Image (spheres, coloured by chain):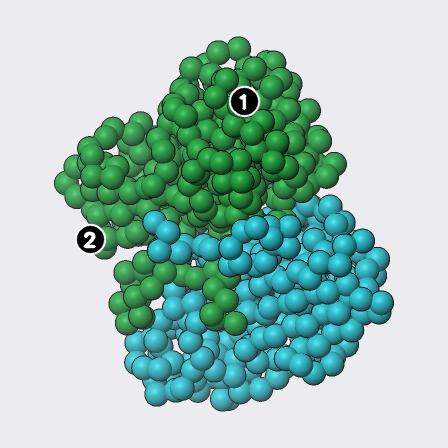
Chain colours: A cyan, B green
Amino acid sequence: MSDDEVTVFVPGHVTGFFSSHPDDDPSKAGSRGAGLTLTDGVTVRLTPAGHTRTTLNGAEITVDPVERVCEALSVSARIEATTDLPLGAGFGVSGALALGTALAANQAFDRQLSENEVISVAHGAEVRSGTGLGDVVAQARGGVPIRLEPGGPAYGRLDGVPASSRIEYVTFGELSTESVLSGDTDRLSDAGLESLSMLLEEPTLSTLLFASRRFAREADLLTDRVREAIEDVSAVGGEASMAMLGRTVFALGSGLSDAGYDPAICHTHAAGASIIDEPTMATAPSRPPRANNVGDL
Amino acid sequence: MSDDEVTVFVPGHVTGFFSSHPDDDPSKAGSRGAGLTLTDGVTVRLTPAGHTRTTLNGAEITVDPVERVCEALSVSARIEATTDLPLGAGFGVSGALALGTALAANQAFDRQLSENEVISVAHGAEVRSGTGLGDVVAQARGGVPIRLEPGGPAYGRLDGVPASSRIEYVTFGELSTESVLSGDTDRLSDAGLESLSMLLEEPTLSTLLFASRRFAREADLLTDRVREAIEDVSAVGGEASMAMLGRTVFALGSGLSDAGYDPAICHTHAAGASIIDEPTMATAPSRPPRANNVGDL
């Protein structure tokens, strides 16, 4: 066992619409749908330790998917996560913690799993915990993921909207993923599949936002404050929708600013989750892997 | 038709080992194997124009895969590509030009193809041109791609080595992909499949380099100068191998520098090819999508 400390960055992920596809086999269970991965995400620093202890922004927490990942990989470690994302608001923080822990533990403990195997472990932990169905595979991919078929890498299929955009968001409070996913999801799933076929006919950011708004209405998940913000953005010619599942509104470009809100500002994230510090590369200048770093070109 | 100018960055890709899998259907044809995507890559700027004209680092060139992509998408455009990568040396520049052109044209001409569809067009163009078999799907993925099954997104299957590393490389000249791929590839493919199973047993960077060196020997592609450089890196405890197909040696970390060479220095690239400027986001601050930008966290 190595005592390397490993740091991983996992992008945030807002789902615009989805259909729920439970299965006894967690690698087949998941969701179909689409969303955006964000440059605002979760940084997970893992250090092997005698017993597993997780902190998020300095506060000790128990995260069921993280516990399951550590059990699956037979590791115990100190996991220090930091994020600017609001919690319980639809940004896939639990999926990010599970995936970040799996990637970091695989590296720190030299478990020699492939990327797909690491993703499977994190996806299975998230599904078993009932905290999410599609965030992990989306966060592992990056970009603007379309979940064509549910499940982990062995069964799921992904595509993407080939675009990037500045993204703004505001949050009005929490919404429990468990409560919605444990309720009757038939109507929700029907609406999700209709939105998915719309997006596949025209895989653009504008259609993604349109199909997401339609889903939020059909699935009857809009709260008044969320509906109002989406309408405010539309009123100034912008595109916004609701993050599933949270009382969060996200918009393309400067939609929320233009509508007079004071949003958080980020960008779609080109890369999936990745290790940002490689302990075995001690001789290399310390810096993160760089994607689309125009300075390099 | 829009007159937007679109810019795309496509990472370079060095293949360490591969097996060749031709098929009459270009979406099934391809290669299995593994390699590294690099932060040194190709930037493609596309502007719709009356007739297609391509320049690379300012010099006019004819690139068969690029012509095929433009035909497939029924577009004509001015394509200005720039790269620091050596040409014909195993960095997947032709695949990058095809993929960059396809991504940029899809955006500039509002062709509304999904990411997988764009990749299929570029992969098919590269295969039909005989200029490559696996670079496009690897460059679309980013990271350290393992090509489990050959072909474009509809048939191919990818995994990855979950690691990142500083990469160094030196080039001693060109090697024609066409000449090797058009020759008897049975021995080469047998060696490639053996190296692939080695890597799948232990998907680490070190095993990737080991399996690549083994492939280069078995496939009898090592030139004296390349062999010497690989041995020089091994002599100082480093890991290096040969880029397929070019007289290029790539090394992990500072292997070539430690061995007294004056290599180009880059890093594995976390993201696949992506649009680095979004014309529809005129209101957004002009900047590329950022991946693993620690400044954001």
Disc 2 secondary structure class: loop
- The kind of residue tagged 2 is Asp
- Above or below, comparing residue A37 to residue A179 in the picture: above
Number of the front mark, 2 or 1: 1
Q: Chain of mark 2?
A: B
- Residue A104, given in percent of the width and then of the height, sits at 68, 59
Q: Which residue bears the numbered disc 1?
A: B227
Q: Give the amino acid at mark 1.
A: Arg
Residue B139 visible in the snapshot: no
Chain ID, mark 1: B
What residue sits 48% from the left and 21% below the top? B225
Q: Residue at x 61, y 23 (%)?
A: B215
Please indicate, yes or no, whether residue B287 appears anywhere in the rendered image. Answer: yes
Residue found at x 40% / y 61%: B289
The residue that mark 2 highlights is B3
SS type, badge 1: helix
